[in-house]
Amino acid sequence: MNIIIGVSWPFANGELHIGHAASSLPGDVIARYHRLKGNNVILVSGTDCHGTPTEVKALKENKSPKEIVDECHVSFDKDFEDFGISFDLYNRTDDEYHKKFVQEQFVKYYNNGYLEEKEEEQLYCEHCKLFLADRYIIGICPKCGSEIKGDECEKCGSLLTIDEVKETKCSICGSKTSYKINKNLYFKLSNFQNDIKFLLESKRNLWRENAVNFTERYLNEGIPDRCASRTLNYGIDIPIEGFKDKKLYGWFENVWGYVTASKKYAENNNLNWEDFWKNTGNNKIYLIHAKDNIPFHSVIFPSLLLATNDNYKLPDKIVSDEYITIEGEKLSKSKGNYITLRHLLDNYPVDSIRYYFSINNPETRDFNFTYEGFINSINGELLGKWGNFVNRTLQFINKSFDGKLINLKINETLENKLKELYDVVGKDIDNGDTKDGLSKIFDFINYSNKYFDENEPWKLAKEATNKCEEILYNCCNIILNINNLLKPYFIETTKRVEGYLNVNIVEWSYNRLSSVSLSKEINPLFIRYDKSVIEEERKLLNK
Ligand SMILES: [Zn+2]
Ligand SMILES: [Zn+2]
């Protein structure tokens, strides 16, 4: 089967934070699982280079937008790589290949009547030479007279339209704004109301509940047409006469990045991109993102695909996570309640980060990241349960049996349970429920520790060596298979465990260990963290 997994594209604005870590990881877990299953996988994402946040950051730092984008792209790429997100291509939206493709789609829409001209008055800053989106406007609330940002008054709670706001100024430079006539092209999204309704009905059981609910609400309100052109300095040129001074709106071009990145990858690797993206009956498309991105993936992207009339397959799985909070508070860079992915990567083993984010993946409710929870999960679950099971089994064999076992009698009950585990964990991951899969693996690890404890092999080592070997052999067989089941989640310890066992498995299926001959040097998979780390880390927050 051919599988596309698209992880949402981070804006070129600052550093990757733990929200990006949480929302990209399920995509990688799903990709690694399908590769082990022998499917053809293309996992893509990239840097979203165009948009007001990037231009504002450039203005503030006195740099060009391209400089900002280049810096961000290099750091995003490196962070994702170190986090083990196994992108086949991590692209960027200022890539020429991407630009050319989306411009072609735009011309197609124009010729097919999906784009409509509209003239409207918009707030403009003469100094910045920008038409200002609402969130870049400061002014006075007409109801209570306090200063407000955008169209919502925090003081009296009034929701206003931007025309009601008094004494409007540009929030970037502080200059007074003026109205200026702006001519734009609108994409007729409303034409696709029925198609999206039909899509939702056909995928109701495959999409996350939040995606279903959000899309339903959107449909009930009626899908509005959407402005596709912007007056920005940095972006993709609109290839239509009369609009050549304008750029494509970010929402229009960035979702196309899934197609352009995977098409580019396919062409460079002798694959046919249409086997992945068109209706072939043998492909699957996953889109992975946080819930604020739902409408772009459940409504806008499918409409853009349909409007081409090119037989595109629409997304099968919308894996839209809830939010992440830190120590009970909203992520906020300005308030200092903010943790970069780089900070975690520089201070903790990558598998411990991947574990904590996966086991808490916000599938149905928000995930509250706490350092106490994180450190406890390393000491308790990773070191105390999995690390301990591996370590005590393998050390025992090295100490008492010189690393080799002769009695390889399989326990069929254990074997059947392991076989079953491949099915249930596989189903969870395939379904996008990566957290459930991991928690089932750890349930089995608990069960395995109990098996070890109840059989008390340490009492059998001298007088009943045959029985002792049998138990240890079955523990090794558990280690081999649990380690294999953990491969979508872990990227470092899994390699070490295979090294200890002298095996190398590259398939998602039960394997019976045919001999036991361990490596001489076995090191603990995880190290214990002192609890004082929790306080030290908390002090770094809110600064
Ligand atoms: Zn007010
Ligand atoms: Zn300004």
Image: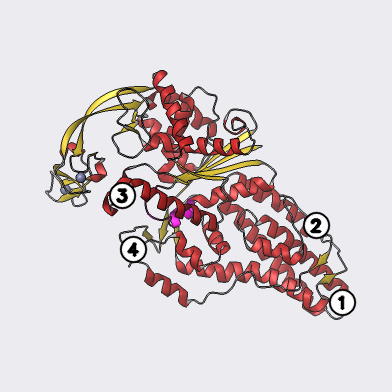
Give amino acid for label 1. Answer: Ala
- Kindly report which numbered mark, 1 or 2, lies closer to the viewer in this rendering: 2
> Of label 3 and label 2, which has the lower sequence position?
3
Q: Would you say the residues marked 3 and 1 are in contact, meaning their CB atoms lie under 8 Å apart?
A: no
Give amino acid for label 3. Answer: Ala
| Quadrant of the drawing holding the N terminus | top right
- Kindly report which numbered mark, 3 or 2, lies closer to the viewer in this rendering: 3
Provide residue 224's location: percent of width, then percent of height.
Answer: 34, 29
Res. 464 mark: 1
Secondary structure at numbered mark 4: loop
> Of label 4 and label 2, which has the lower sequence position?
4
Q: Does residue 376 appear left or right of residue 159 in this picture?
A: right
Q: CA distance from mark 3 to mark 2?
A: 58 Å
- Which residue matches tag 2? 512
Q: CA distance from mark 4 to mark 1?
A: 60 Å
> Of label 4 and label 1, which has the lower sequence position?
4
Secondary structure at numbered mark 1: loop
Provide residue 520's location: percent of width, then percent of height.
Answer: 76, 73
Q: Does residue 358 appear left or right of residue 35 in this picture?
A: left
> Of label 3 and label 1, which has the lower sequence position?
3
Residue situated in front as seen by the camera: 138 or 327: 138
Residue 151 figure quarter: top left
- Does the residue tagged 2 have its C-beta within 8 Å of any atom of ligand 2? no
Instruction: Residue at 63% x, 28% y: name it.
Output: 280
- Which residue matches tag 4? 336
Other-residue count near label 3 (Cα within 10 Å), few / some / many at <14 / 14–19 / ≥20: some
Residue 318: in magenta span: no
Q: What stretch of residues is rendered in magenta?
A: 11-23
- Which residue matches tag 3? 58
Residue situated in front as seen by the camera: 476 or 501: 501
Q: CA distance from mark 1 to mark 2?
A: 24 Å
